[in-house]
Image (tube, rainbow, N blue to C red):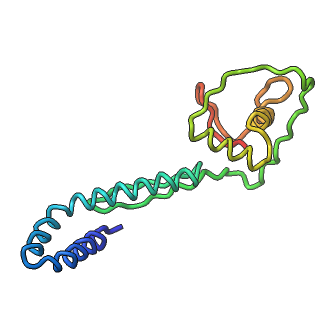
Amino acid sequence: MDLTPYVENLRAELAVAAEAGGDEARGLAERLTAALESATRLTLLDALSAAAEEITRDLLPGSVEVRLRGRDPNFVVVPPAVPDSAEPEPAPTVSPLTDEAATARINFRLPDQLKQLVEQAANRDGVSINTWLVRAVATMVDADGVTRKHRGTWEGQRFSGWVR
């Protein structure tokens, strides 16, 4: 993306505004625009980076990145990974819990961004966050505590993949 037209547009707008002040103001505007060009480019890059972050939050698990090539920013869109299998994987069935009255409390920490996504998913499904999390865990673990086949991978203490 070439930022030059935007920088030039700002320079032209400043020149038009300086015309009202006469020759002295016009000369000052010309001196200022040369000095402000790099600051203007940096400000535009900050705005593009902030926009890419907002888009990434809505696009998760995909992302949008702003990369510089010389002086020009480029957008790189990374779509979410698509499984290689030709057949869609059947939706996992939730094992019924044997005793609904017996519950346990655990401390569970989520990054703020993931917590917001869980809240949105629970609201979309019309259930509480706790119910949504219990269902998500139940779809991953069978009654014997064995992890079901899933699309993600285990890497040490981390899990990556999809939860519906």
In the drawing, does residue 136 fall left or right of residue 117? right
Frontmost residue, 24 versus 54: 24
Q: Residue at x 38, y 61 (%)?
A: 74
Q: Is residue 158 above or below residue 24?
A: above
Screen quadrant of the N terminus: bottom left
Identify which residue, 145 or 2, lies in the foreground: 2
State the image quarter where residue 112 is shown.
top right
Q: Position of residue 157 (x, y in %)?
A: 60, 25
Residue ID at (64%, 35%)? 153
Q: Position of residue 32 (x, y in %)?
A: 14, 65
- Residue 135 is left or right of residue 52, and the answer is right
Q: Measured along the vertical axis of the image, is residue 27 above or below residue 46?
A: below
99, above or below 124, in the image: above
- The residue shown at (14%, 70%) is 29
**Does the rendering let one see residue 148?**
no
Q: Is residue 26 left or right of residue 1?
A: left
**Residue 51 on image: x %, y %:** 45, 57
Q: Is residue 138 left or right of residue 9?
A: right
Q: Quadrant of the C terminus?
A: top right
Q: Where is residue 19 shown, x and y percent of the image?
A: 16, 80
Question: Residue 114's image quarter?
Answer: top right
